[in-house]
Amino acid sequence: MAFSDQLIDPKKDPMGAAILDYARTGKAARLRVLSSMFEEDEMPIETLFRSFDEMPAIEQEALRMAKGKILDVGAGSGCHALALQDMGKDVCAVEISPLSVEAMQLRGVKDARLVNMFDARFTEKYDTILMLMNGSGIVGRLENMPMFFDRMREMLNPGGVILMDSSDLKYLYENEDGSVDIDLNGEYYGLVDYEMRYKGVRGGKFDCLYVDFDTLACCAEACGFTATLVKEGEHYDYLCELKIKD
Ligand code: SAH
């Protein structure tokens, strides 16, 4: 979504505003999600504040596997960082939303930083890099994969891994007879454009990538990484482990 050192302007951050409202008061207004591909939808704020027990099994598995120095990328309300702290693990949470960072600090995330993970000035290295709740979304488009893996190579300690979840959106295009309507000459079918609105706050449009496992594994291979399918979820979602090839 945002490469280089870009951060989100708090005046244009609907999701951050909703997260901070909820962190402060336990309530939030409607967070509206718009896309040219779907009917208007709403994101229930409570889901962004899920506890370990409320998390999908693939996220729980990622938290169990996370070890050493852990980086939670695009940490949102800090739900994963807090669960990891409870497990006694060492986690740093990064966000490009100043409002989300404020919410994380309020909620007790010990190391919450306002940092874009693509910012070359951020030079720390990690044993586990977590990208959860469609973590591939931050990559934005398939064309950005080489840049993403280059950056990951800089940020991983020797033997380190990335744990990323995503979904195969193929089911959206499936007919009853099992055939699939996907235009192979068009954009990749997992590319979704979004725009969010909260109270009077409008964010800009952004690309969000949902990547099927085979496509992710091909990109990883081309970029010197190996992808292992760790666990499949209940609805075409999965958790994947990415490692630098020996
Ligand atoms: N992981 C959280 C939130 C996912 S939403 C959860 O599971 O609940 C994705 C988050 O990533 C947003 O809050 C957005 O502000 C943040 N983000 C997007 N691009 C980023 C980047 N380049 N570096 C750090 N955070 C980023």
Image (cartoon, rainbow, N blue to C red):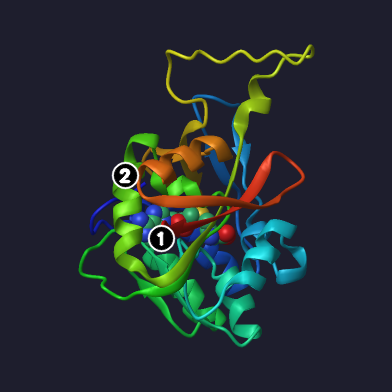
Tell me where residue 17 appears, x and y as whole percent.
Answer: 47, 59
**Ligand 1 shown in quarter:** bottom left
Q: Quadrant of the C terminus?
A: bottom left
Q: Nearer the viewer, residue 128 or 2?
A: 128
Point out the frontmost of discs 2 and 1.
1
Label 1: which secondary element? loop
Depicted 40 relative to depicted 72: above or below: above
Near-viewer residue (219 or 102): 219
User: How many tags in the picture?
Assistant: 2
Q: Residue at x 74, y 59 (%)?
A: 57
Separation (CA) of disc 2 from disc 1: 18 Å
Q: Amino acid at mark 2?
A: Pro
Residue shown at the point (61%, 88%) measured from the top left: 88
**How far from the left and from the top, in percent, is residue 183?**
50, 13
- Density class for disc 1 (Cα within 10 Å; few <14, some 14-19, many ≥20) is few
Choose top left, top right, bottom left or bottom right for residue 230: bottom right
Q: Which residue is mark 1?
A: 246
Checking the image for residue 146, the label placed there is: 2
Residue type at mark 1? Asp
Question: Does residue 65 appear in this view?
Answer: yes
Percent coordinates x, y for residue 224 in the rendering: 36, 50
Nearest to the observer: residue 235 or residue 202? 235
Q: Quadrant of residue 122?
A: bottom left
Farthest-out residue, front = 246
